[in-house]
Amino acid sequence: MLDLVDECGKDLKNCGYESIDLGKYNATCSKLFIDSDGKSKKVGFDKGHYYILTAPLVLGLPDEHFNFLKSEIKKRLKLLFKLNKIDKNKNFLFVGIGNPKIISDSFGSRVIDKIEIKPFQEENNIFKISPNTFSNTGINAYEIVKLLVEAFDISVVVLFDALVTTNLIRLGTSLQFNDAGLTPGSAVNKFGMAINKETLGVPCLSVGAPFMISAGDISKKCSSDLILAEKDVEEKVEYLSSLVAEIFNELLEN
């Protein structure tokens, strides 16, 4: 299964896919609204609103670049909040998917580390967890998330995960965010269980960034089971995790 919706290999224009130039830093934003079972089956992704922001000049630019990307992403996340009738004062559960010990798979846990909570105050409505991977725990992330949703009366789940791309250019330069949730490890194994509104009963937002690529997508001589990452992957993971965490900290601040 592919992680990025616009890498599905289908003609998405007939499904309403659009891509616009954001006017600075060669950044673009694409969107696709999968609003029917027919579109979902054709594309191979669950129904929902998908945005993919790509900024090829992620590193080596001034703070203005960081703030520009933050503004563009926040604008679209606010729309997802509105479409899903999300109240920032309700209980949120932030979930960092992936293996924190593998740099290219640590995006989720690094975002979680930077999400601000108020654990010692009664008005705290933000909870966070990094459940690690099924291969390390033997427990599906879905089972952990489901228990926490029920135990803490969670109204919104927000998931962060490192993704796999088929395009070298997108490594560490793209962010996909949607209200369709996700299936942990869907690009590399078949053990994950879907975490979405249908399975949990609450809105589930997902934010992912691709830091890995299959060797088979680079050369037909390589095994598709071999997953590769760039040498500067840690710098990109740190940059994008800081960007995403800061956005959500601002979205939920009072």
Image (cartoon, grey):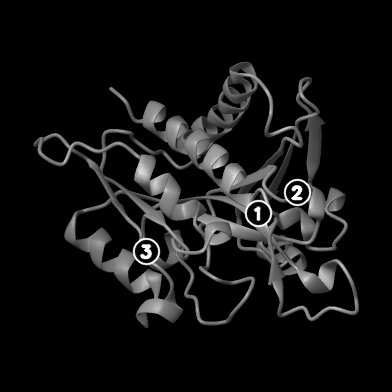
Give the side of residue 74 with respect to residue 198, left or right.
right
Mark 3 lies on a secondary structure that is helix
Q: Earlier in the sequence, mark 2 or mark 1?
A: 2
User: In which quadrant of the rendered image does the N terminus lie?
Assistant: bottom right
Disc 3 versus disc 1: nearer the observer: 1
x and y percentages locating residue 165 in the rendered image: 73, 59
Q: Amino acid at mark 2?
A: Arg
Mark 3, Cα crowd under 10 Å, few <14 / some 14-19 / many 20+, is many
Disc 3 versus disc 2: nearer the observer: 2
Q: Amino acid at mark 1?
A: Pro
What residue sits 50% from the left and 31% below the top?
78
Q: CA distance from mark 2 to mark 1?
A: 7 Å
Task: Report if residue 51 is visible in the image.
Answer: no
Using the image, tell me which numbered label, if any, was put on residue 200: 3
Mark 2 lies on a secondary structure that is helix
Using the image, tell me which numbered label, if any, was put on residue 170: 2
Write down the quadrant of residue 141 in the picture. Answer: bottom left
Task: Give the labeled residue for mark 1.
Answer: 210
What residue sits 14% from the left and 34% below the top?
123
Give the side of residue 185 with respect to residue 151, left or right.
right
Give the side of residue 214 with respect to residue 249, left or right.
right
x and y percentages locating residue 143 in the rendered image: 33, 73
Write down the quadrant of residue 251 in the picture. Answer: top left
Q: CA distance from mark 3 to mark 1?
A: 25 Å
